Image (cartoon, rainbow, N blue to C red):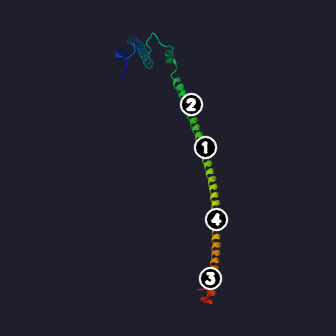
Amino acid sequence: MALTPDDVVTKQFQHVRFKDGFDPDEVDDFLDEIVIEWRKALEENAELKAKLAAYESGSAPAPVAEVPAAAAEAPAAPASEAPTGSATATAGIIELAQRLHDEHVAEGEAKRNQLIAEAEGEVARIRSEAEAKQREESARLERERNTLEARITELRNFERDYRSQLRGYIEGQLRELDEKSASTDSTPVSAIGL
């Protein structure tokens, strides 16, 4: 439902108790001003509609007391220029919109390319750091492996030497024991002092 000036005039507001509100007289005065202006606008609208209908039908417009200068000049313009001017303006707006669109697209593509380039640079940096770290870690592990292999070789040599020394010592002890046993076999038990 459309709002009319009479709706504005008959509108009743509820009064709120114990709270500050607007002065009802001031609100009524303001609404009266709105109604007056609104009625003027509606009358002017009706007059312009009547003029337009008369112009479109080809009959002479009825005399009107007040007609804005711009409204009086508008019907005098040739009908063929309005579509051309409107078409030119529309074409200009479309061209401007297309240009703005192209600029935004180009700006978006430039931003995308910049972000891709930055990301690829970051990937290359991270990859080179990872490869350098991997080389350092491989070198450290290789040094540690070489150290451990040298220590293992050293321990094997020590074990071999220790075994041979131990074998030599045990064999020496066994020879001595055999010699003593051989010498004890030839000596009578009574000579040993038993």
Q: Which residue is mark 3?
A: 177
Q: Which residue is mark 4?
A: 151
Residue type at mark 1?
Glu
Q: Nearer the viewer, residue 97 or 106?
A: 106
Residue type at mark 4?
Arg
Q: Which residue is mark 2?
A: 96
* The quarter of the displayed image where residue 48 is located: top left
Residue 138: x and y, percent?
63, 58
Front of the two marks 2 and 3: 3
| Label 3 secondary element | helix
Q: Is residue 165 above or below residue 144?
A: below
* The quarter of the displayed image where residue 65 is located: top left
Q: Is residue 91 above or below residue 15?
A: below
Residue type at mark 3?
Leu
Q: CA distance from mark 1 to mark 3?
A: 86 Å
| For residue 140, side relative to residue 64 (left or right) | right
Tell me whether circle 2 and circle 3 mark residues in contact (CB < 8 Å). no
Tell me whether circle 2 and circle 4 mark residues in contact (CB < 8 Å). no
Residue at 63 percent of width and 68 percent of height? 155
